[in-house]
Image (cartoon, rainbow, N blue to C red):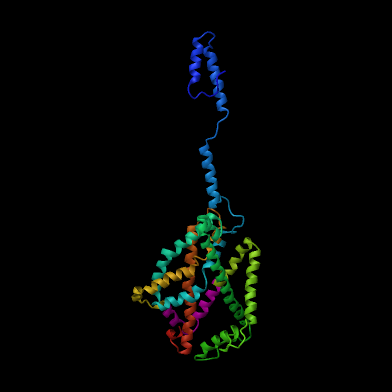
Amino acid sequence: AYPTSDPNGQHEQDAQQQQSGPGAASPTDVDLNQKEANHKDESYIKPDPNDVERNQSAVSVDSDAGFDDGDPEEAWNSRWSFILAAIGSAIGLGNFWRFPFQAYAYGGGTFFIPYLIALFIVGIPLMQLEMAMGQVFRRAVTQSFGRLHPRFRGIGLAAGMVSFGVVCYYNAILAWGNVMFVKSFYSEMPWDVSNVEGTEVLSKPVDHFVNKVLMFPPSDDHFPRVIPAGLYAGAVFMWASIWLILIKGQDFISKAVWVTVLAPVVMLFVLIIQGATLPGAKEGVKAYIGRWDLSQLSDGNMWVDAFGQIFFSLGTGFGVMPAYASLNPRNSNIIKDAFIVSACNCLFSFLAGFAVFTIIGFFSHETGISIDDLR
């Protein structure tokens, strides 16, 4: 019998020598032996060590990078639940408080030019990047940055700390709103200005808010500084609401956003309609978008504030969007979703300006104070 492997061709030389000598095997026997040897070689194919190493490396890289092929265990129950949650995260105080007065300060409608440029150059691309990072790595912001590089985990941790700080002061402000909401059911609202005239139209609600809701102490260092009971109860209510929503799980959150996000939109339209019926509302709207001072485009501060407003308003850099997008299906169209969220956020800012300035126009009309002085 011949050996099963003969890398040096020795097999063929031995066969030729045996054929030429006495008792040499016939050509038929040699062919049969060769076929048997080939059959034994084919019955076991030794794997290539290079292929095994490459496969192990690919598995290791995918595992380290967090590229999960399946959907997350907890996910949004619909695409629009995710979009509403992202919109609710983006819309905030900057839409109501900062944007309208930035537009007024920089020539009215002129401010929209750098604002829209900043939206398309910086806002939407950053929104797409943050959502894509969360959707690809299927992790919150700290772990997503860690998948990029272990040393980047600190960036995600810092973003998480910023988000916690934002939640803390937002809950404090919402506690003010809870107190005002309860007092709005009084038979006579404490800030009612229907029976007052002149500057009291402005001073009465301000005095009530500062002295009765916030209860700012007088300028006396010996006066005890305590949290008013109403504000404390309002803050506890907000933290309890957050806790209850979170422990219910992702499915309940997907349903809650339809209330927590759409309710403020409804209230915004109520404010716009109510403000439009007030005397002086027209002058307020003119002050908001009726002026187009194009000379303001040469002011570098306007461009800085416009780009800053985009960052402040969209909420990029807070770590929220990667966390939300990590619960998306892998094939979700994140490009379109980011555009929808960014566009809705800016549209809300634009509409909020009408709610604010119709009321400011009313104050100006009733008090005789110009809008410039009111600002």
Write the start and end of the magenta stretch as one range: 265-288
Residue 193 in view, yes or no: no
- Residue appearing at x 49%, y 20% in the figure: 10
The location of residue 207, given as percent across then percent down, is: 55, 87
The location of residue 345, given as percent across then percent down, is: 49, 68
Residue 266 included in the magenta stretch of the image: yes
Asked which quadrant contains residue 181, the reply is: bottom right
User: 358 above or below 70?
Assistant: below
User: 317 above or below 174?
Assistant: above
The location of residue 323, given as percent across then percent down, is: 55, 61
- Residue appearing at x 48%, y 85% in the figure: 363
Most foreground residue, 55 or 7: 7
Most foreground residue, 35 or 14: 14
Asked which quadrant contains residue 264, the reply is: bottom right
- Residue appearing at x 48%, y 80% in the figure: 358
- Image quarter where the C terminus lies is bottom left
Residue 161 included in the magenta stretch of the image: no
Asked which quadrant contains residue 161, the reply is: bottom right
Dominant secondary-structure state across the stretch colored magenta: helix
- Image quarter where the N terminus lies is top right
The location of residue 208, given as percent across then percent down, is: 57, 86
Residue 54 in view, yes or no: yes
